[in-house]
Image (spheres, rainbow, N blue to C red):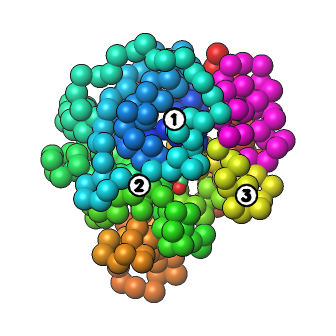
Amino acid sequence: MQRKIIIDTDPGQDDAVAMLLALASPDEFEILGIVAVAGNIGIEWTVKNACKIIELSGRTDVRCYAGCERPMRRVLVTAEHVHGKTGLGGTDLPEPTSRLGPQHGVDFIINRLLAEAPGTITLCTLGPLTDVAMALVKAPAIGPRIREIVMMGGAFSEGGNITPAAEFNIYVDPEAADIVLASGVPITMLPLDVTHRVLTTQARLDRIAGLGNRTGRTIGAMIDFSQRFDLEKYGWQGAPLHDPCVIAYLLRPDLFAGREINVSVETASPLTRGMTVADWWRVTDRPPNVNFIREADAGGFYDLLTERLARLP
Ligand code: RIB
Ligand code: CA
């Protein structure tokens, strides 16, 4: 039985890998659409990059929509220092030829949630939560109709990656994260705690780059570019591969482990803006609102990723 999903993303090399994993899995996913949001880089690039990745996959049955070009309240903070000036540093994919969907991405999310049967659509968020939060504010009736939000974002034991306190996706739009976390929608959160367990070691990257297809070669070049920042920063034998954890979790939840806890987000303090305060040890009476994932079977993750990417052109 296919799961209906909408992917909201700010490509970004790791977003691109996550998109390709989903696009390579038509038996498991009916991808209703992909919405590009401002985050790693400005909207004009995230839209173009999302279209390029869809066309790379050959899945031109999947449409891209342009979402929000700035956070709800904050000035956009981007990450060109990681992803390069195009957001897909390391590759030079052809200009996309596909046409964007006619609606704004937020309206696309609202309209599909109102059109489809309640509880049948999963929102997979790979960037700041601006589009999902705006949809919840513009049309509160969609909240109970969302099956689940599976999001990459936040951190507990790993601290932050854009500030000492905050993970990038949450930092960029903490107000949006606050709205989503308070929405009552079932949420599975894949934070840095788990994405730091699935490192792109050279052997894993070589296996993907050596698949013999355009997808593998492109991913090899993309991650080779984007991982250099984290290799330098952390000094590990590989870099975290954040966003594909969202799609891998939906394909193989048995590869991951976590528990239902309360996660709240700091929106007021300049020092700790965007910090996710994860009550892992349940020391407060704040009710659990997310399935917070902290463990992953890295070998199983890369076996799944490699096997699926081999299916693409
Ligand atoms: O902190 C990691 C997240 O920020 C990932 O989604 C990456 O693509 C960047 O958006
Ligand atoms: Ca992302």
100 with respect to 151 (left or right): left
Q: Is residue 223 above or below residue 115?
A: below
Residue 218 appearing in the image = yes
Q: Is residue 173 above or below residue 105?
A: below
Q: CA distance from mark 3 to mark 2?
A: 21 Å
Position in image of residue 288 (x %, y %): 39, 71
| Residue at screen point 41% across, 21% down | 62
Question: SS for tag 3?
Answer: helix
Question: SS for tag 1?
Answer: loop
The C terminus sits in image quarter: top right
User: Residue pushed farthest right?
Assistant: 203
Q: Is residue 45 above or below residue 39?
A: above
The residue stretch that appears in magenta: 198-225
Report whether the residue tagged 3 is closer than 8 Å to ligand 1. no
Tell me whether the residue at label 1 lies in contact with that at label 2, contact meaning CB atoms closer than 8 angstroms.
Answer: no
Q: How many marks?
A: 3
Q: Main secondary structure of the magenta part?
A: helix
Q: Upstream in the sequence, badge 3 or badge 2?
A: 2
Mark 1: which amino acid? Thr
Q: Which residue is mark 3?
A: 232
| Residue at screen point 76% across, 52% down | 238
Q: Is residue 253 above or below residue 52?
A: below
